[in-house]
Image: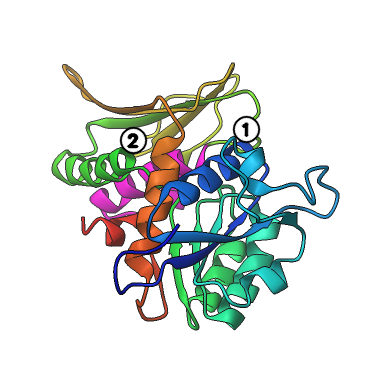
Amino acid sequence: MSGSAGTAPLKVVVLGASGRMGRMLVRYCSQADDIDLTGAIERSDAPELGQDAGSLAGVEPLGVPVTEDLHQAIANADALIDFTGPASTVAASALAAQAKATHVVGSTGLSDEDAEHLRRAARHTSVVWADNMSLGINLLTALVEQVSARLGTEFDIEIVEMHHRHKVDAPSGTALALGHAAARGRGVNLENVAARGRDGLTGARKPGDIGFAALRGGEVIGDHTVSFVGSNERIELSHHAVSRDIYAGGALAAVRWAAGKPPGLYSMRDVLEL
């Protein structure tokens, strides 16, 4: 696609291009007037290597074959969109930093060590990292922090999430982000108050704990509920994703926002100015 008059389209590479999220990102890029898909990356053993990324995504052929060579693809790119996994995200972060290309990261399950790699890369380029890129989830996160700050520890906080049977990490990155928001509202570190596993005779609930429960089944895209439970009342804040389009739309919004931004580690709250 061509950009608006006088503005060159942003050159974007999609990592994990043959997966469900990758195909949606390719489709969104192909439909955007201000974005050109210039690269589609997959792992070296992917059967889709060599196929046209547009055809795989269910749109017209784009003349962009799926390849394993991220180093070449990113050399002249403006941005990389990455919804893969920790190992590939860490590897891509170094290449994005070298190429001074924006790295939009929607990968989940990243460890503290993985996050440190993103921070190092962010010294050289703009990195937008979010466990969930939907507008609704980021609004929910802001609300959770506000409610948590205004309610005392006599209100118990429980976070329940449900995803499809294929998801490999638990709790979800979004659930953990909501937990961090709740902890920030209380002025504590989530690591010190998280209750992530209950089984058997666990004893009474500890005051101030933030509990997590992870459900898996079917093809559920993503449901998250944060409950603030008092002695005589309960407040529930929920978000239900009905389509992965919300993540692709958020990723493209992040690419557009980060264009021309100085190096730094940003979040969707920055993108949405929350």
Amino acid under label 2? Pro
Dot 1, how many residues are within 10 Å of its Cα: few (below 14), some (14-19), or many (20+)? some
Depth check, front residue: 26 or 263: 26
Query: Mark 1 sits on what residue?
Result: 167
Per the image, is 34 magenta?
Answer: no
Give the percent coordinates (x, y) of residue 189: 39, 55
Under tag 1, what secondary structure?
loop
Q: Residue at x 70, y 58 (%)?
A: 87
Q: Quadrant of residue 47?
A: top right
Q: Quadrant of residue 156?
A: top left
Point out the image quarter for the N terminus.
bottom left
Depth check, front residue: 132 or 4: 4
Up-down relation of residue 178 to residue 224 (above or below): below
Q: Is residue 215 visible?
A: yes
Q: Nearer the viewer, mark 2 or mark 1?
A: 1
Q: Residue at x 81, y 46 (%)?
A: 46
Amino acid under label 1? Lys
Depth check, front residue: 218 or 13: 13
Q: Residue at x 62, y 71 (%)?
A: 74
**Callout 2 touching callout 1 (CB < 8 Å):** no
On screen, residue 145 versus residue 80, left or right, reads left
Q: Quadrant of residue 239?
A: top left
First of labels 2, 1 by sequence position: 1
Q: Which mark is residue 207?
A: 2
Q: Determine the residue located farthest toward the right in the rendered image.
A: 45
Give the percent coordinates (x, y) of residue 197: 56, 31
Give the percent coordinates (x, y) of residue 233: 17, 18
Magenta-highlighted residues:
172-193
On screen, residue 251 versus residue 208, left or right, reads right
